[in-house]
Image (spheres, rainbow, N blue to C red):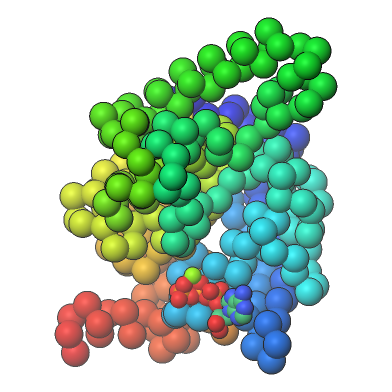
Amino acid sequence: MTYKDLSTTPAGSEGPILRCEGLTKAFGGVNAVNGATFDVPRNKITALIGPNGAGKTTVVNILSGAMKSDSGTVHLGSTDVTNMDRAKIARLGLMRTFQLSRELGGLSVLENLLVAPKVQAGESIFNIFFRPRLVKREERQNIERATEILRTYGLYDLRDNWARELSGGQKKLLEISRGVMASPSVFLLDEPMAGVNPALIERIGGYILDMKAQGVTVLMIEHNLNVVERICDNVIVLAEGKTLATGKLSELRQNKEVVTAYLGEVINASTGH
Ligand SMILES: Nc1ncnc2c1ncn2[C@@H]1O[C@H](COP(=O)(O)OP(=O)(O)OP(=O)(O)O)[C@@H](O)[C@H]1O
Ligand SMILES: [Mg+2]
Protein backbone atom coordinates (compact mmCIF):
# COMPACT_ATOMS: atom_id res chain seq x y z
CA MET A 1 0.00 0.00 0.00
CA THR A 2 1.52 3.29 -1.00
CA TYR A 3 0.48 6.75 0.01
CA LYS A 4 1.53 10.08 -1.40
CA ASP A 5 5.09 11.07 -0.66
CA LEU A 6 4.76 14.17 1.51
CA SER A 7 7.78 15.87 0.01
CA THR A 8 6.09 15.87 -3.40
CA THR A 9 2.91 17.61 -2.25
CA PRO A 10 2.50 21.34 -2.68
CA ALA A 11 1.94 21.56 1.07
CA GLY A 12 5.57 22.45 1.82
CA SER A 13 7.81 20.35 4.00
CA GLU A 14 8.32 22.23 7.26
CA GLY A 15 6.20 23.18 10.25
CA PRO A 16 2.73 21.88 11.03
CA ILE A 17 0.95 20.40 8.04
CA LEU A 18 -2.37 21.94 9.04
CA ARG A 19 -2.97 25.15 10.98
CA CYS A 20 -6.32 26.59 11.83
CA GLU A 21 -6.79 29.89 13.54
CA GLY A 22 -9.90 31.43 14.99
CA LEU A 23 -12.37 29.24 13.13
CA THR A 24 -16.02 30.03 13.74
CA LYS A 25 -19.23 28.59 12.40
CA ALA A 26 -22.75 29.24 13.62
CA PHE A 27 -25.96 27.44 12.73
CA GLY A 28 -28.79 29.82 13.50
CA GLY A 29 -28.15 30.73 17.10
CA VAL A 30 -25.78 27.83 17.82
CA ASN A 31 -22.07 28.68 17.81
CA ALA A 32 -20.94 25.22 16.77
CA VAL A 33 -17.31 26.34 16.28
CA ASN A 34 -16.29 29.36 18.25
CA GLY A 35 -12.65 30.30 17.75
CA ALA A 36 -10.99 26.89 17.32
CA THR A 37 -7.23 27.35 16.93
CA PHE A 38 -4.76 24.50 16.64
CA ASP A 39 -1.89 23.00 14.66
CA VAL A 40 -1.71 19.45 13.37
CA PRO A 41 1.89 18.23 13.37
CA ARG A 42 3.26 16.54 10.30
CA ASN A 43 3.40 12.75 10.12
CA LYS A 44 1.81 12.19 13.53
CA ILE A 45 -1.51 10.79 14.65
CA THR A 46 -3.46 13.53 16.42
CA ALA A 47 -6.73 12.92 18.24
CA LEU A 48 -9.52 15.48 18.25
CA ILE A 49 -11.59 14.79 21.35
CA GLY A 50 -14.37 16.53 23.26
CA PRO A 51 -17.96 16.16 24.40
CA ASN A 52 -20.86 15.49 22.03
CA GLY A 53 -21.76 18.69 20.21
CA ALA A 54 -18.32 20.27 20.86
CA GLY A 55 -17.98 21.06 17.15
CA LYS A 56 -15.50 18.32 16.16
CA THR A 57 -17.31 17.20 13.02
CA THR A 58 -17.98 20.81 12.02
CA VAL A 59 -14.22 21.52 12.28
CA VAL A 60 -13.48 18.54 10.03
CA ASN A 61 -16.17 19.73 7.61
CA ILE A 62 -14.45 23.13 7.43
CA LEU A 63 -10.91 21.71 7.10
CA SER A 64 -11.96 19.42 4.26
CA GLY A 65 -13.93 22.08 2.40
CA ALA A 66 -17.29 20.39 2.93
CA MET A 67 -18.52 23.50 4.76
CA LYS A 68 -17.50 27.16 4.72
CA SER A 69 -16.45 28.79 7.98
CA ASP A 70 -17.85 32.16 9.06
CA SER A 71 -14.37 33.40 9.96
CA GLY A 72 -10.85 32.15 10.65
CA THR A 73 -8.13 30.70 8.46
CA VAL A 74 -6.91 27.25 7.47
CA HIS A 75 -3.45 26.54 6.04
CA LEU A 76 -2.39 23.25 4.52
CA GLY A 77 1.38 23.50 4.74
CA SER A 78 2.17 26.86 3.18
CA THR A 79 -1.08 27.01 1.17
CA ASP A 80 -4.02 29.08 2.40
CA VAL A 81 -6.98 26.74 1.86
CA THR A 82 -9.53 28.79 3.81
CA ASN A 83 -12.98 28.03 2.38
CA MET A 84 -11.40 26.51 -0.72
CA ASP A 85 -13.46 24.13 -2.79
CA ARG A 86 -13.32 20.57 -1.45
CA ALA A 87 -12.12 19.08 -4.75
CA LYS A 88 -9.15 21.46 -4.73
CA ILE A 89 -8.33 20.59 -1.13
CA ALA A 90 -8.47 16.91 -2.05
CA ARG A 91 -6.09 17.56 -4.92
CA LEU A 92 -3.67 19.11 -2.44
CA GLY A 93 -3.66 15.77 -0.61
CA LEU A 94 -6.25 16.14 2.16
CA MET A 95 -9.02 13.54 2.43
CA ARG A 96 -11.61 12.83 5.11
CA THR A 97 -14.03 10.13 6.17
CA PHE A 98 -17.53 10.71 7.48
CA GLN A 99 -18.88 9.93 10.96
CA LEU A 100 -21.81 8.16 9.30
CA SER A 101 -20.46 5.99 6.49
CA ARG A 102 -21.37 7.31 3.07
CA GLU A 103 -21.05 4.20 0.93
CA LEU A 104 -23.03 4.04 -2.29
CA GLY A 105 -25.32 1.12 -1.43
CA GLY A 106 -26.36 0.35 -4.99
CA LEU A 107 -22.77 -0.10 -6.17
CA SER A 108 -20.44 -2.98 -5.45
CA VAL A 109 -17.64 -2.64 -2.92
CA LEU A 110 -15.07 -2.40 -5.74
CA GLU A 111 -17.16 0.18 -7.63
CA ASN A 112 -17.34 2.30 -4.47
CA LEU A 113 -13.57 2.66 -4.65
CA LEU A 114 -13.57 3.32 -8.38
CA VAL A 115 -15.96 6.27 -8.03
CA ALA A 116 -14.30 7.62 -4.88
CA PRO A 117 -13.27 11.28 -5.15
CA LYS A 118 -9.93 11.70 -6.87
CA VAL A 119 -8.23 13.35 -9.76
CA GLN A 120 -8.37 11.15 -12.83
CA ALA A 121 -7.97 11.71 -16.53
CA GLY A 122 -11.28 10.03 -17.37
CA GLU A 123 -13.17 12.78 -15.61
CA SER A 124 -12.30 15.24 -18.34
CA ILE A 125 -14.64 15.11 -21.34
CA PHE A 126 -11.71 16.21 -23.49
CA ASN A 127 -9.71 13.18 -22.44
CA ILE A 128 -12.59 10.73 -22.95
CA PHE A 129 -12.93 11.80 -26.61
CA PHE A 130 -9.40 12.67 -27.57
CA ARG A 131 -7.19 10.60 -25.31
CA PRO A 132 -9.12 7.33 -24.91
CA ARG A 133 -5.95 5.28 -24.42
CA LEU A 134 -4.90 7.44 -21.49
CA VAL A 135 -8.36 6.97 -19.96
CA LYS A 136 -8.23 3.19 -20.46
CA ARG A 137 -4.80 3.03 -18.85
CA GLU A 138 -6.00 5.06 -15.89
CA GLU A 139 -9.01 2.81 -15.50
CA ARG A 140 -6.78 -0.23 -15.41
CA GLN A 141 -4.47 1.40 -12.87
CA ASN A 142 -7.45 2.42 -10.74
CA ILE A 143 -8.79 -1.13 -10.69
CA GLU A 144 -5.35 -2.42 -9.71
CA ARG A 145 -5.04 0.13 -6.93
CA ALA A 146 -8.60 -0.48 -5.67
CA THR A 147 -7.94 -4.21 -5.61
CA GLU A 148 -4.73 -3.72 -3.64
CA ILE A 149 -6.54 -1.50 -1.12
CA LEU A 150 -9.38 -4.01 -0.71
CA ARG A 151 -6.85 -6.75 -0.03
CA THR A 152 -5.07 -4.58 2.54
CA TYR A 153 -8.31 -3.73 4.34
CA GLY A 154 -9.72 -7.27 4.28
CA LEU A 155 -12.58 -6.46 1.89
CA TYR A 156 -11.27 -8.28 -1.18
CA ASP A 157 -13.59 -11.27 -0.82
CA LEU A 158 -16.53 -8.87 -0.63
CA ARG A 159 -15.51 -6.87 -3.72
CA ASP A 160 -18.55 -7.88 -5.78
CA ASN A 161 -21.10 -7.54 -2.95
CA TRP A 162 -23.49 -4.59 -2.80
CA ALA A 163 -22.08 -2.01 -0.42
CA ARG A 164 -25.48 -1.84 1.29
CA GLU A 165 -25.12 -5.49 2.36
CA LEU A 166 -21.97 -4.85 4.41
CA SER A 167 -22.00 -4.91 8.21
CA GLY A 168 -21.48 -1.67 10.14
CA GLY A 169 -17.81 -2.50 10.69
CA GLN A 170 -17.25 -3.41 7.05
CA LYS A 171 -18.84 -0.08 6.04
CA LYS A 172 -16.30 1.69 8.26
CA LEU A 173 -13.50 -0.17 6.43
CA LEU A 174 -15.02 0.78 3.08
CA GLU A 175 -15.23 4.42 4.17
CA ILE A 176 -11.51 4.40 5.02
CA SER A 177 -10.64 2.52 1.79
CA ARG A 178 -12.45 5.13 -0.30
CA GLY A 179 -10.31 7.86 1.27
CA VAL A 180 -7.09 5.87 0.81
CA MET A 181 -7.89 5.52 -2.90
CA ALA A 182 -6.91 9.19 -3.34
CA SER A 183 -3.48 8.63 -1.71
CA PRO A 184 -3.93 11.32 0.92
CA SER A 185 -1.01 12.92 2.67
CA VAL A 186 -3.38 14.25 5.34
CA PHE A 187 -6.27 12.01 6.35
CA LEU A 188 -9.05 13.25 8.63
CA LEU A 189 -11.03 10.41 10.21
CA ASP A 190 -14.35 11.15 11.90
CA GLU A 191 -14.85 8.41 14.52
CA PRO A 192 -13.42 5.59 12.38
CA MET A 193 -14.01 3.02 15.12
CA ALA A 194 -17.40 4.07 16.48
CA GLY A 195 -19.75 1.13 16.91
CA VAL A 196 -17.29 -1.53 15.76
CA ASN A 197 -16.27 -4.63 17.74
CA PRO A 198 -13.03 -4.75 19.76
CA ALA A 199 -11.22 -6.99 17.26
CA LEU A 200 -11.96 -4.55 14.44
CA ILE A 201 -10.99 -1.57 16.63
CA GLU A 202 -7.61 -3.28 17.00
CA ARG A 203 -7.34 -3.84 13.24
CA ILE A 204 -8.31 -0.29 12.30
CA GLY A 205 -5.79 0.99 14.87
CA GLY A 206 -3.13 -1.05 13.07
CA TYR A 207 -4.14 0.38 9.69
CA ILE A 208 -3.85 3.92 11.04
CA LEU A 209 -0.40 3.19 12.47
CA ASP A 210 0.60 1.78 9.06
CA MET A 211 -0.52 5.02 7.41
CA LYS A 212 1.68 6.99 9.77
CA ALA A 213 4.61 4.66 9.07
CA GLN A 214 4.23 5.57 5.40
CA GLY A 215 4.29 9.30 5.97
CA VAL A 216 0.60 10.14 6.24
CA THR A 217 -0.58 12.71 8.80
CA VAL A 218 -3.76 11.61 10.59
CA LEU A 219 -6.22 13.73 12.54
CA MET A 220 -8.90 11.49 14.06
CA ILE A 221 -12.00 12.27 16.06
CA GLU A 222 -12.19 9.57 18.71
CA HIS A 223 -14.17 9.05 21.91
CA ASN A 224 -12.40 5.85 22.98
CA LEU A 225 -9.52 7.02 25.18
CA ASN A 226 -7.89 3.58 25.22
CA VAL A 227 -7.47 3.94 21.46
CA VAL A 228 -6.21 7.51 21.84
CA GLU A 229 -3.69 6.39 24.44
CA ARG A 230 -2.42 3.52 22.30
CA ILE A 231 -2.10 5.10 18.88
CA CYS A 232 -2.26 8.89 19.08
CA ASP A 233 0.84 11.06 19.55
CA ASN A 234 -1.03 14.24 20.45
CA VAL A 235 -4.48 15.28 21.54
CA ILE A 236 -6.55 18.39 20.85
CA VAL A 237 -9.48 18.93 23.20
CA LEU A 238 -12.41 20.86 21.81
CA ALA A 239 -15.22 22.11 24.04
CA GLU A 240 -18.04 24.43 23.03
CA GLY A 241 -16.31 25.11 19.72
CA LYS A 242 -13.03 26.26 21.29
CA THR A 243 -9.67 24.58 21.71
CA LEU A 244 -9.55 23.87 25.44
CA ALA A 245 -6.10 22.28 25.51
CA THR A 246 -3.56 20.38 23.43
CA GLY A 247 -0.85 17.95 24.50
CA LYS A 248 -0.25 14.31 25.35
CA LEU A 249 -3.19 12.44 26.85
CA SER A 250 -1.15 11.80 30.03
CA GLU A 251 -0.65 15.57 30.46
CA LEU A 252 -4.28 16.32 29.76
CA ARG A 253 -5.35 13.87 32.45
CA GLN A 254 -3.67 16.25 34.94
CA ASN A 255 -5.46 19.29 33.49
CA LYS A 256 -8.43 20.17 35.74
CA GLU A 257 -10.28 22.10 33.04
CA VAL A 258 -10.05 19.20 30.62
CA VAL A 259 -11.09 16.67 33.23
CA THR A 260 -14.08 18.81 34.17
CA ALA A 261 -15.13 19.46 30.58
CA TYR A 262 -14.62 16.02 29.17
CA LEU A 263 -12.33 13.44 30.67
CA GLY A 264 -14.22 13.19 33.96
CA GLU A 265 -17.36 12.39 32.06
CA VAL A 266 -15.67 9.73 29.93
CA ILE A 267 -13.75 8.16 32.81
CA ASN A 268 -16.95 8.02 34.89
CA ALA A 269 -18.84 6.51 31.98
CA SER A 270 -16.22 3.80 31.51
CA THR A 271 -16.01 2.90 35.20
CA GLY A 272 -19.78 3.09 35.69
CA HIS A 273 -19.62 5.74 38.45
N1 LIG B 1 -25.70 21.21 9.66
C1 LIG B 1 -26.04 21.65 10.88
N2 LIG B 1 -27.12 22.42 11.07
C2 LIG B 1 -27.45 22.87 12.30
N3 LIG B 1 -26.76 22.60 13.42
C3 LIG B 1 -25.67 21.83 13.30
C4 LIG B 1 -25.24 21.31 12.02
N4 LIG B 1 -24.12 20.58 12.21
C5 LIG B 1 -23.85 20.63 13.53
N5 LIG B 1 -24.78 21.38 14.19
C6 LIG B 1 -24.78 21.69 15.61
O1 LIG B 1 -23.49 22.20 15.91
C7 LIG B 1 -23.00 21.70 17.14
C8 LIG B 1 -21.70 20.95 16.93
O2 LIG B 1 -21.98 19.77 16.18
P1 LIG B 1 -20.86 18.76 15.71
O3 LIG B 1 -21.55 17.70 14.92
O4 LIG B 1 -19.77 19.50 15.04
O5 LIG B 1 -20.34 18.18 17.11
P2 LIG B 1 -19.39 16.94 17.43
O6 LIG B 1 -18.37 17.43 18.36
O7 LIG B 1 -18.96 16.28 16.17
O8 LIG B 1 -20.38 15.97 18.24
P3 LIG B 1 -20.45 14.34 18.30
O9 LIG B 1 -19.37 13.91 19.25
O10 LIG B 1 -21.82 14.09 18.84
O11 LIG B 1 -20.29 13.83 16.90
C9 LIG B 1 -24.13 20.85 17.72
O12 LIG B 1 -24.90 21.68 18.59
C10 LIG B 1 -24.93 20.46 16.49
O13 LIG B 1 -26.28 20.23 16.82
MG1 LIG C 1 -19.21 14.45 15.32
Q: Taking 200 as reference, is 115 above or below it?
A: above
Please indicate whether residue 143 sits to the left or right of residue 164 in the image: right
Residue at (51, 42) in percent of width and height = 179
Q: Quadrant of the C terminus?
A: bottom left
Residue at (39, 37) in percent of width and height = 109
Residue at (70, 81) in percent of width and height = 26
Q: Taking 257 as reference, is 13 above or below it?
A: above
Can residue 120 be seen at all in this image of the molecule? Answer: yes
Residue 97 in the image: state x and y as whole percent: 50, 52
Please indicate whether residue 257 sits to the left or right of residue 244 in the image: left
Q: Taking 94 as reference, is 182 above or below it?
A: above
Can residue 237 be seen at all in this image of the molecule? Answer: no
Please indicate whether residue 195 sits to the left or right of residue 48 in the image: left
In depth, the one of 75 and 149 nearer the eye is: 149
Residue 271 in the image: state x and y as whole percent: 18, 81
Residue 180 in the image: state x and y as whole percent: 49, 37
Residue at (80, 13) in percent of width and height = 130
Looking at this view, name the residue that lies furthest to the front: 106
Please indicate whether residue 107 sits to the left or right of residue 21 in the image: left
Residue 209 in the image: state x and y as whole percent: 38, 41
Looking at this view, name the residue that lies furthest to the top: 133
Q: Quadrant of the N terminus?
A: top left
